[in-house]
Amino acid sequence: MIHIDELFETISVTCHLKGVVGIDYGSHMSYLSAGSSPVPLSAYVLLYVEQGCMCYKHLGQDYKLEAGTLILYAPCTMMSVLSKTDDFKGHQLFCDKAIFDRLVMENGGDVGLLQLKKEFPVVVLTARQQADINAFFELMMSAVTVTRHYRIQIVMGLVRSLQLYIIELHSAFIDPHSLSSDRERIYRDFMKLAAEHYQHERKLFFYANRLCISTTYLSRIVRQVSGQTVKEILKNMLVTEAGYRLRNTTQSVGEISYCLGFEDQSAFTHYFCKHVGMTPAKYRALR
């Protein structure tokens, strides 16, 4: 898998903020050529097509991207390009997985983004929505390229706003009755609780008790909606937060261990290495 900073160098993006986001603006995207081997990326990618057309395959399904369409694909997505017109041009935003996932958690693990990642739809934008997306890219380029004291906070705020905007776009694909069902409500309530307490509460009973339902029922609901277990969701939250702190703060490994509820630094190192495949020190050295 290509690390996000290596990706920026490989593609020669228009501008980027190291380890956070990169923008490929008005590009012909030569790295997405027909017949080339798909490359898994360690980033979320938002692709907006300005002109031309591209056909690609994902999980055995063929898709067509034309001018005015938008897609968001997740890390490790294997997208095989089938064909692309010579005049193809568009804009891309690459966002670090840990940062994107952390912001999703702060948004309550919204079901709209969850279904987007599962179903991988292509959105056809109206003229107004196309103008909105173009304005977003211009704002993001300004935030990345102009030196400001709060540059990273502004960039992350824009990414979070983008997530909410995409959720609104995809609302047309989701049955509004299903979103208001008890199942979706319980899942949303669980994700909100998890975002508030995962650093110190990682037992299923705690969340079931707070929601006044049985552990068996909560486990079933979470798996039905997300395809993951409660344990897996809490683990992903913990690993994402640990990775974010290692790459974007000056906290020591010991301080991070304490903040995330581990008994000691050794326990945290063992846990992180088990789920990430490297020690916290090595992961921090990647930034």
Image (cartoon, rainbow, N blue to C red):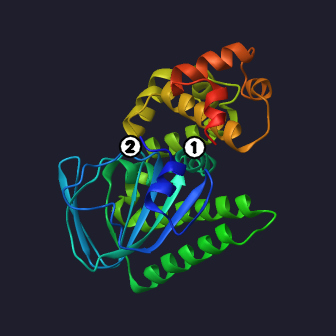
Q: In the rendering, at what x and y percent does residue 164 appear? A: 55, 62
Which of these two is toward me, 95 or 71? 95
Q: Mark 2 or 1 closer to N-term? A: 2
Which of these two is toward me, 115 or 278? 278
| Image quarter (top left, top right, bottom left or bottom right) of the N terminus | top left
Outermost residue on the bottom side: it is 127
Give neighbour class at mark 2: few <14, some 14-19, many 20+ (Cα, 10 Å): some
Which of these two is toward me, 110 or 220? 110
Which of these two is toward me, 196 or 236? 236
**Hey, what amino acid is under mark 2?**
Cys
- The residue that disc 1 covers is 98
**Hey, what amino acid is under mark 1?**
Ala
Is residue 242 found left or right of 87 in the rendered image?
Answer: right
Residue 76: give its label: 2
Figure disc tally: 2
Local SS, label 2: loop
Q: In the rendering, at what x and y percent does residue 284 appear? A: 66, 35
Q: Residue 124's quadrant in the figure? A: bottom left
Residue at screen point 65% across, 58% down: 156
Where is 255 relative to 164, above or below? Answer: above
Asked whether residue 203 appears in the rendered view, the answer is no
Is residue 173 found left or right of 187 in the rendered image?
Answer: left
Residue at screen point 42% across, 39% down: 226
Residue 148: give its label: none
Residue at screen point 70% across, 38% down: 245
Q: In the rendering, at what x and y percent does residue 73 appear? A: 39, 54
Give neighbour class at mark 1: few <14, some 14-19, many 20+ (Cα, 10 Å): many
